[in-house]
Amino acid sequence: MPPVRVAVLASGGGTNLQALLDACGPGAPARITRVISNKADAGALERARQAGIPAVVLHDPGDPRELLAALADAELVVLAGYLRLVPAPVVAQFPRRLINIHPALLPAFGGPGMYGRRVHEAVLASGAAQAGATVHYVDEQYDRGPIIAQQTVPVRPDDTPETLAERVLAVEHELLPHVVFDLARRLQEQGDTDEHGG
Ligand code: GRF
């Protein structure tokens, strides 16, 4: 069965993209076929180029036509540190095929403006004993779609936003490829079923 074609959207350094690239070796159920960013200087684009994967910069990330064109070949779309809202027509085009990773245990510590260091500051300020990472389906709101998988990380008494971010990110790098491969295998099975008329 051919690997599922995955497009990754990223605005930042792209360590989650890198975790996916590293996981997508021969025999993997998924293959990264395109990396898309709203920022021309995103580190994620450089990682894509290093891996020989087409990298695309969006001129107007709010324009659904431009994004849909960039995603034309994608079967599964992964937001990995993508800081823009995905336009509703794009969400509608990828039902159960558009996912996001967030560095907290949603539904807590999500929503507009809740990204990067702010998430970890809020977790520490809340006194929560557990932090973690969430992968969820994307809908028209920030960090709101149905949750697919979560992994917890204990908060330590001496944690700073930086130390907590680092431990959560390490967990993200395991969780994201795991979920992407799970979904890809499911899509492969569906494709196989469709092909055989069942
Ligand atoms: C990650 O913490 C991810 O959960 C969040 O943005 C960060 C992206 O980091 N959505 P990177 O660009 O993958 O290193």
Image (cartoon, grey):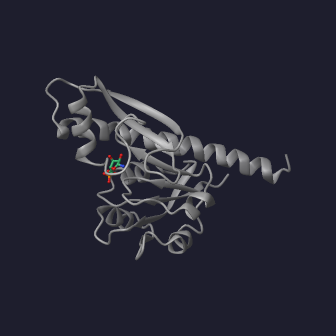
Q: Residue at x 58, y 44 (%)?
A: 183
Report the label total. Answer: 0
State left or right for residue 181 relative to residue 163: right
Residue at the far bottom in the pictured view? 59
Vertical placement of residue 4 versus 198, above or below: below
Residue 131: quarter of image: top left
| Quadrant housing the C terminus | top right
**Residue lying farthest right?**
197
**Looking at the picture, how far across and down is residue 177, in whole percent?**
46, 44
Please determine whether, in this image, residue 67 is positioned above or below residue 158.
below
Note whether 118 is above or below 10 in the view shown: above
Question: Which picture quadrant has residue 171?
Answer: top left
Residue 89, by quadrant, is: bottom right
Which residue is at the front of the view, 145 or 25?
A: 145
Q: Nearer the viewer, residue 22 or 36?
A: 36
In percent of width and height, residue 74 lies at 58, 62
Q: Residue at left 62%, top 52%? A: 95
List x then y, in percent, for residue 169: 31, 41
Residue drawn at point x = 51 percent, y = 38 percent: 147
Residue extending farthest left: 158
Left or right: 147 as drawn, with respect to 101: right
Q: Position of residue 190 (x, y in %)?
A: 72, 47
Residue 166 relative to residue 183: left or right = left
Residue nearest the viewer, comparing 181 with 166: 166
